[in-house]
Image: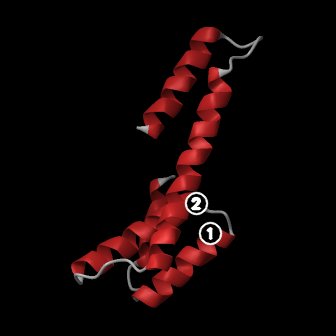
Amino acid sequence: MSTAAGDKIDALVDDLDLKKLVELVRVAETAERYEDMCKFVKKLVKAKSEKGEDLDVDERNLLSVAYKNVVGSKRASWRTLSGGFDDADEELLGKYKNLVEDELE
């Protein structure tokens, strides 16, 4: 994500109360914007931990959905790349696969 887009996301969530933040997490889920969803959930976790509060069951489920979808997508990409391609440059394919592996770490 570009820095400008990241700044816009930060500006969007900066002044939201917890209820609105959870609402935004749900909107991101519905829009299948899981990277954004992760950012929103991270903000939610920080806000609740600063108050000394735990996530409720619903919030924990949202956290799980966000990260499972982001990681699942990257794992699917890795599996595809690991399967190999008949007509692709092996060195280039290896470099690309390493890039995906770095994202998974």
SS state under label 1:
helix
SS state under label 2:
helix
The residue drawn where x is 55% and y is 79% is 24
The residue drawn where x is 62% and y is 62% is 33
Q: Quadrant of residue 32?
A: bottom right
Quick one: label 1, few (<14), some, or many (20+) residues within 10 Å? some
Q: Quadrant of residue 42?
A: bottom left
Q: Visible in this render: residue 8?
A: no
Residue 52 percent location from the top left of the image: 22, 81
Where does label 2 land, which residue?
34
The residue drawn where x is 63% and y is 35% is 77
Residue 46 relative to residue 56: left or right: left
Where does label 1 land, which residue?
29
Q: Nearer the viewer, residue 15 or 94?
A: 94
The residue drawn where x is 43% and y is 75% is 11
Residue 8 relative to residue 88: left or right: left
Q: Up-down: is 76 above or below 26?
A: above
Q: CA distance from mark 2 to mark 1?
A: 6 Å
